Image (cartoon, rainbow, N blue to C red):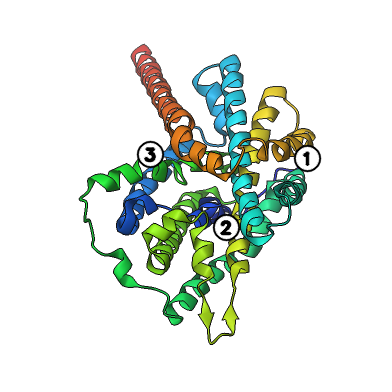
Amino acid sequence: MLKESISLTQLAAVVFNFQIGSTIVIGLGLKAKEDAWIVLLIALGLGIIITLFYIYMFSLTPGKNLFEMFEYCFNRPIAKGLSLVYAAYFFYYSCRIIRDFGELIASTVLPLTPIEISTIMLVFVMGYILYMGVEVLARTAEIFTPYAFIFIMLLFIFLYVGKNLDFSNIKPVLADGFKPLWTAVFPYEIVRPYGQLLVLTFILSNVSNAKYSKKIIIYSVLISSLLLLVTSLMIILSLGYELGLRSNFPLLSAARLVSIGNFLQRIDAIVVFCMMLGTLVKSCIYIYGGLKAIEYIFGQSFRYFSIPMICIVGVFTTLIARNYTDHMEEGLQSNPFLLHLPLQFGLPALMVFIMLIKHWNKSNSKKKAKSGGQNVF
């Protein structure tokens, strides 16, 4: 089978939607109250550093994905064990992302429709896309990303024209000092969405023009982060941080404030479309990462496992939490410390350290061999 190829624009679209995911509707940094925008600026700076770290890790073993890096750093049995752990992690987190979308649809858009129905419909689409391959996913993201970007900008314009933005909601600045900012940034605003970029190592080897992929990823992360900053500002300026914290989907609540001339109203579909696209791309990337882990472990093409694993993900999406409150509590309190920090930063940092040692040993061996050859003559 021919190797799938992704263009630079498709890579940019995938990274953009992966960063946004379901985060765009839930909002970021709201725990910092009026200073949420400062939290996101700090997180953006740290996120660029994290992105550069992952790019550097990939450059140490060019052409290898995460599981092949495990084998390079350790050995095949350990690599298989770690691949199994990351496969479970990727599948689990894809369930959480899909659950976000299901809760949005079930609680606000289609309240009489069971959450299982909306989840199954989305999962079927994801299963078809993944079976066709990551190139199809990249093309889908490339087509619809401009619409999502335009819709978010239009939402900001509509809120501004409708005089729904109150700039006094971001005052006073730093009323409680800098300590609440660090509490809000670490760890949640770092692991989501920047630490999650680790999973993108599976598609970097498919980029047709890898020479410019580093710049494209950084620019995409920067633009998507600024868009998340704009959405959080929209939430605070229109709703205030108190109502934003109480709302399950604050951006959707903000969109419902739009009323221009009693004609342009109820533009919920804009928010739902943006979240659906982000959920589709991000979940597919996570599931693709899990499928590549199974491919590495069993030595069979990931397509053999795509449909069965999609069905399992669809079932567990509705089983991972009893309700939306439990779902959010698990994601905000336990997961960052038990899953995200060790798997997104701990093990990759150890791997980079081992890679550097191996590169240093190889360079020393070459120098010794070269000097030994010169001494012979």
- Assign the N terminus to one quadrant of the image: top right
In front: mark 3 or mark 1? 3
Element under disc 3: helix
Residue 146 horizontal/vertical position (percent):
58, 67
Mark 3 surroundings: few (<14), some (14-19) or many (≥20) residues within 10 A = some
Question: Which labelled disc corresponds to residue 187?
Answer: 3
Question: Separation of disc 3 and disc 1 at Cα?
Answer: 41 Å
Give x and y (percent) for residue 25: 52, 57
User: Quarter of the image holding residue 252?
Assistant: bottom right
Tell me if I can see residue 329 in this picture. yes
State if disc 2 and disc 1 touch (CB < 8 Å). Answer: no
The reply to whether dot 3 and dot 1 touch (C-beta < 8 Å) is no
Front of the two marks 1 and 2: 2
Q: Which mark is residue 1?
A: 1
Nearer to us in this view, 102 or 222: 102
Query: What amino acid does circle 1 point to?
Result: Met
Mark-to-mark CA distance, 3 and 2: 26 Å
Q: Residue furthest top?
A: 376
Type of residue at label 3?
A: Pro
Relative depth, front residue between 182 and 46: 182
Q: How many marks?
A: 3
Q: Position of residue 190 (x, y in %)?
A: 40, 43
Examine the rendered structure and indicate whether residue 68 appears above or below residue 96. Answer: above
Side of 279 where 305 appears, left or right:
right
Sequence-first tag of 3 and 1: 1
Query: What residue is at 48 percent from the left and 34 percent from the top?
Result: 335
Q: Is residue 33 left or right of residue 151?
A: left
Mark 1 secondary-structure assignment: loop
Q: Quadrant of residue 236?
A: bottom left
Viewport quadrant of the C terminus: top left
- Name the residue carrying label 2: 13
- Looking at the rendered structure, the kind of residue marked 2 is Ala
